[in-house]
Every structure is written in structure tokens, then in C-alpha cells.
Image (spheres, helix red, strand yellow):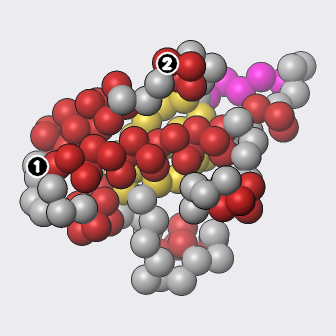
Amino acid sequence: MKINDKEFERIVGRSLDRIPDEIMRHVKNVAIRVEDRPEPELLEEMGMPEDEILFGLYTGEALPDRLLTFPSFYPDTIILFKEPLLDFCRDIEELEEEIEITVVHEIAHYFGISEERLAELGYD
């Protein structure tokens, strides 16, 4: 699927609108950024093979790990990787759904939920 950056951003916005308010109202100071693809160095740093498909990534300090006396001055960030998402999805509807799933998955990391626990819950 081929989509220009502006249309992709609109799709991201619609996908974010699909996330229930009971989740989003607890998310504070988190930016969402789009990049074309993860850099090989990032995958290496994460211990992932270079051909691993990665749709998104949360960067920041999970809420349970934060110190009240040392707040972050910068927002945590969820990065969406456009090219893997476009390669995986067959149509706009599937793309919106996958972006929603990816953002919720990364928000779970913001709340301190591990990959292992997400897999136990069926969100792997």
C-alpha cells in the first residue's frame, strides 16, 4: 500500500480517535511521532534481528518507575513506523486498526506492562 505522509498522519489521527477515553484520559505528556522505519542500530540495541517487523516503540520512563522528586522535562514518545505498517496492511481499514492496536500496545508499556504480560493477555 502506498500513502503519502499527510494522509498517513490523518489515518493516525483517526486511529487515535478509536482508542477508548478510559485509556487515553490516563495518558499524560506522551508524544506520538511517525518515522519511516526503525534504524538497524535501534533493532540491534533492542536485541532484535534486522528483518524483525516493528510497528511501534515506546521510549520513556514507565509510570511505575518514575520518581516524584525527579519529573521528566520531555514527553515520553510513541514512535510509529510507517513502512512496516504499510507493508503489513492490505487496506486503510486494516491500517487504522493496526495503528490503534500498536498505540494501545505502546501505551501499555507507558503504564509499565511488559512484553511478557502483554503476551499472556493475548496482545503479542
Image height check: is 24 above or below 86? above
Relative vertical location of residue 31 with respect to residue 117 in this rendering, above or below: above
Q: Is residue 89 left or right of residue 106?
A: left
Classify residue 63 by image quadrant: top right
Residue ID for mark 2: 21
Is 72 a magenta residue? Answer: yes
Q: Nearer the viewer, residue 3 or 89?
A: 89
Q: Position of residue 115 (x, y in %)?
A: 68, 59
Q: Residue 84 is drawn in which quadrant?
A: bottom left
Q: Earlier in the sequence, mark 2 or mark 1?
A: 1
Q: Which residue is mark 1?
A: 4
| Residue at 48% across, 31% down | 31
Q: Secondary structure at mark 2?
A: helix
Name the magenta segment's main secondary structure. loop
| Quadrant that contains the N terminus | bottom left
* Residue 106 visible, this orientation: yes
10 Å crowding of disc 1: few (<14), some (14-19), many (20+): few
Amino acid tagged 1: Asn
Residue 120: say if magenta: no
Which quadrant of the figure has residue 49? bottom right
Res. 83 visible in picture: no
Mark nearest the camera among 2 and 1 is 2
Task: Tell me where the magenta segment starts and ends, as one range.
Answer: 70-74
- Give the x, y percent position of residue 108: 63, 42
